[in-house]
Image (cartoon, rainbow, N blue to C red):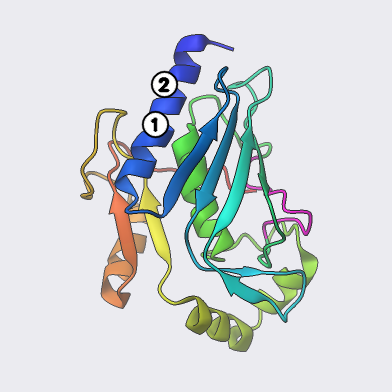
Amino acid sequence: MNDIRLAAERERVFALAAASNGAVEVLSVAPNYRQYEIRLNVAAPVGTSSSYRVDSHHRLMMDLPDDFPANGPICTFGKAIFVPNVYPSGVACIVDNLWVPSQHLDQVICDLVEEIQAVNPNFHSVANQEAGRHLADPVFEQELRRRLGPPVLLIPPESPQTRVATIATIGQPVARAIQRASASGVRSVGVAAAPRIRTTRH
């Protein structure tokens, strides 16, 4: 792996954590920058069935393969999260065959924050069939939204040096999401220097 790329990814992750208003915490980083232990502090349904509980602290391990960035990170949560795109084992299917080397770890973390809150789940590729079936039910989805409260949306900072929490130029899909979020009281932090194209979602 390119040492310069690995160091840059580390800086991006720490920049996101600094701009996230506590939603993302970096607990540890391996000396070779190939493994991250992160805590996501957002409300999400935890469990393996529709009798889930709501928890707001989620340990996430991100392991970078030897051929990173040719292949994306392996992302594993420390507990089962009852959403369509996380396997019951805790492995997130957010990074798969749609990964491209130009993507970055801060983008992956932002997508994971949305994924564990069941924000716009991908029903075309479901990792947890039971969660997918329940989330397709408008009544269940409405109750989930009520229990979780307004979702948190994060946008990657524009560079490792950026520490401000304002919205800059963003892609139209994200702009519409931010507009909807603002209208409904959703918390959104961070900045984006370029359109955030969510191609990491499995």
Above or below, 201 relative to 118: above
Name the residue nearer the viewer: 121 or 186.
186
Which residue, given by chain and number where applicable, does mark 1 sit on?
Answer: 12
Distance in Å between CA atoms under marks 1 and 2? 6 Å
Magenta segment boundaries in residue numbering? 85-95
Quarter residue 35 falls in: top right
Residue type pointed to by label 2: Ala
Above or below, 144 relative to 159: below
| Residue 126 at x, y percent in the picture | 73, 59
Above or below, 26 relative to 185: above
Total labels drawn: 2
| Residue 156 at x, y percent in the picture | 36, 42
| Residue 192 at x, y percent in the picture | 30, 41
Which residue, given by chain and number where applicable, does mark 2 sit on?
Answer: 8
Instruction: Note whether residue 155 is visible.
Output: yes
The answer to if 58 sits in the magenta stretch is no
Left or right: 155 as drawn, with respect to 48? left
**What residue do we see at 46% from left, 40% from top?**
107
Badge 2 density bin: few <14, some 14–19, many ≥20, Cα 10 Å: some
The label on residue 201 is: none
Contact, mark 1 vs mark 2 (Cβ under 8 Å): yes
Mark 1, secondary structure of its residue: helix
